[in-house]
Amino acid sequence: MDLIGVVDTMFARVDMGAYALDELRSCPGYGERFEVVHRTVPGFKDLAVCCKRLVEEEGVKILVALGMPGRAPIDQVCAHEASQGIMLAQLLTSTPILEVFVHENEEEDPADLVPVCENRARKHARNAYWMLYEPEQLTRRAGQGIRQGYADAGPIAPAAG
């Protein structure tokens, strides 16, 4: 049975892991074709090592890594460094890790981040499932301005000419 990993953080102000888990458990084949492995780490800088270990020690095929950087400039720098670590973990393991960060400065009112977190976590969890089992779903959506967290931007129409 395949394993899909979900790694979230306790420093996040919204439980994005719960949304990702719920979405994956609603996918066809859950419990028969694949199971979900869930881990929680302190903060987003800890995501990369946990993801790498899940691949190397438990054979996870694809992961969703969820984090919530704060508003301060240092948080944005740390988020960039965490992102670099996640990319390195992908390269070292040849395993996709979908980085799902919701930055606190994306909205003025923190309460407005809850639907962004849910939408982004669910859509990326579904993307992970599609990458593993239904890649044609992604191909069908190419060039459509699909967004995670906010309304889709839509495609850009070609210039008349």
Image (cartoon, helix red, strand yellow):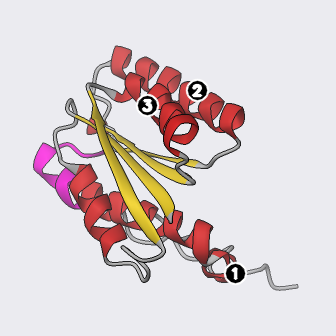
How crowded pointer 2 is (Cα within 10 Å; few <14, some 14-19, many 20+) is rated as some
Q: Is residue 128 visible?
A: yes
110 in relation to 61, above or below: above
Which amino acid, mark 1? Ala
Give SS at disc 1. Answer: loop
Give the residue number, with chain letter if any, for mark 2.
84
Residue 160 pos. (x, y %)? 81, 85
Residue 67 pos. (x, y %)? 34, 38
Residue 157 is marked as 1
Give SS at disc 3. Answer: helix
- Is mark 2 in CB contact (under 8 Å) with mark 3? no
- The range drawn in magenta is 106-115
Give the residue number, with chain letter if any, for mark 3.
50
Residue 34 part of the magenta-drawn span: no
In the image, what residue occupies the spot 36% across and 29% down? Answer: 44
In the image, what residue occupies the spot 59% across and 75% down? Answer: 133
Residue 137 pos. (x, y %)? 61, 81
Gap between marks 2 and 1 measured at Cα = 34 Å
149 in relation to 75, above or below: below
**Which sits earlier in the primary sequence, circle 2 or circle 1?**
2
Q: Which of 5 and 101 is in front in this view?
A: 5
